[in-house]
């Protein structure tokens, strides 16, 4: 009677092949996830920017930096002309879990406001996603 089974070398060879495949495939999926997060942040910034324009049309000004983008979903107590909410739901954080940065008056939009995400690294710098 002969037994047929896998040898240790055959099992190790299969593990090596699977490891090589994983090393090639996993980074590709990781990159796609990051691209999806960046696209989501760009879309959300565009929606916030449009809502800010509507706010400005109704109220004659953009929200102050202190009021922030929360003024798009909750009326500031000093405004009687607020016709919001300008967004269907409150914006809490970017796809990486960091709050969006809102500045009025803007440094880049001197007649408007700046809104941006700090991007994947969570620090101000070259990977920020902006409305300018």
Image (cartoon, rainbow, N blue to C red):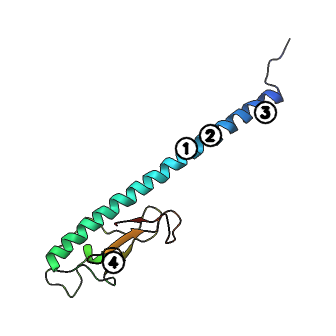
**Quarter of the view holding residue 11:** top right
Going from N to C along the chain, the mark reached first, 3 or 4, is 3
CB within 8 Å, label 2 to label 1: yes
Q: Secondary structure at mark 4?
A: loop
Describe residue 108's horizontal placement relative to residue 95 as left or right: left
- Residue position marked by numbered label 1 in the rendering: 28
Classed neighbour count for the residue bearing mark 2: other residues with Cα under 10 Å, few (<14), some (14–19), many (≥20):
few
Q: CA distance from mark 3 to mark 2?
A: 19 Å
The residue carrying mark 3 is: 12
Residues 108 and 120: in front is 108
Above or below, comparing residue 23 to residue 92 in the picture: above
Question: Residue 33, how many percent across, how many down?
Answer: 49, 50
For mark 4, what is the residue?
A: 106
Instruction: List the residue tagged with mark 2.
Output: 24
Between the residue at mark 3 and the residue at mark 4, the CA separation in whole angstroms equals: 60 Å
Q: Residue furthest right?
A: 1
Cα distance in 3D space between marks 2 and 1: 7 Å
The residue that appears at 79% across and 24% down in the rendered structure is 6
């Amino acid at each position: 009677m002969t037994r047929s089974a896998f040898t240790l070398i055959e099992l190790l060879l299969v593990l090596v092949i699977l490891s090589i495949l994983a090393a090639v495939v996993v980074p590709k999926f990781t990159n796609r996830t990051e691209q999806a997060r960046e696209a989501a942040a760009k879309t959300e910034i565009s929606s916030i920017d449009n809502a800010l324009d509507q706010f400005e049309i109704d109220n004659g000004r953009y929200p102050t930096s202190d009021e922030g983008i929360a003024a798009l979903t909750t009326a500031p107590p000093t405004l009687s002309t607020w016709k919001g909410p300008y967004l269907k739901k409150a914006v809490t954080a970017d796809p990486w879990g960091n709050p969006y940065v809102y500045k009025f008056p803007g440094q880049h939009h001197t007649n408007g406001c700046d809104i941006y995400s700090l991007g994947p690294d969570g620090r101000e710098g070259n990977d920020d996603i902006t409305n300018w």
